[in-house]
Amino acid sequence: MEIVYYCKYCKAFMGVIDGSRVPVEALGFSILTAEEQADMIQYDGAQDTTYVRTVCEYCESALRSHPDLLLSQTPIQ
Ligand SMILES: [Zn+2]
């Protein structure tokens, strides 16, 4: 199984891990709540691939200097 990391804001590909070589506990998912896991992790059974939504360095620094960008993406006006 492959584990693909991508940025949830700009969809940038951030890396891939061969999940069969890494114990799941080492990925840190177990520290997340079930809700956080459901939000961050999507499993594609057809491709046997797990997608992990994270934030790339570019978006992280952009959000840090412009936190209002986060709010502008919410549908609540
Ligand atoms: Zn990004």
Image (cartoon, rainbow, N blue to C red):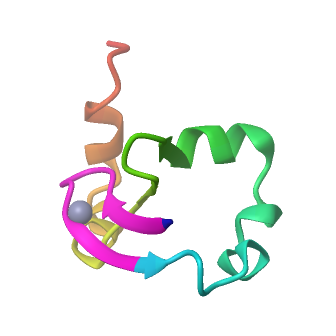
Percent position of residue 34, x then y? 78, 42
Question: Could you say which quadrant of the image residue 27 lies in?
Answer: bottom right
Q: Left or right: where does residue 47 sit relative to residue 23?
A: left
> Can you say whether 72 is above or below 25 in the image?
above
Q: Is residue 27 magenta?
A: no
Q: Quadrant of the C terminus?
A: top left
Percent position of residue 15, x then y? 32, 78
> Can you say whether 47 is above or below 1 in the image?
above
Q: Residue at x 30, y 78 (%)?
A: 57
Percent position of residue 67, x then y? 35, 53
Percent position of residue 29, x then y? 71, 64
User: Which stretch is magenta?
Assistant: 2-16
Dividing the image into four quarters, tell me where ligand 1 lies.
bottom left
- The residue at the far bottom in this view is 21
Choose between 21 and 25: the one closer to the eye: 21
Prevailing SS of the magenta stretch: strand
Q: Left or right: where does residue 34 sit relative to residue 60?
A: right
> Can you say whether 71 is above or below 56 in the image?
above
Q: Residue at x 31, y 71 (%)?
A: 56
Q: Residue at x 40, y 40 (%)?
A: 46
Q: Left or right: where does residue 46 sit relative to residue 13?
A: right
> Can you say whether 61 is above or below 48 in the image?
below
Question: Could you say which quadrant of the image residue 22 lies in?
Answer: bottom right
Total marks placed? 0
Q: Residue at x 63, y 38 (%)?
A: 38
Question: Could you say which quadrant of the image residue 24 lies in?
Answer: bottom right
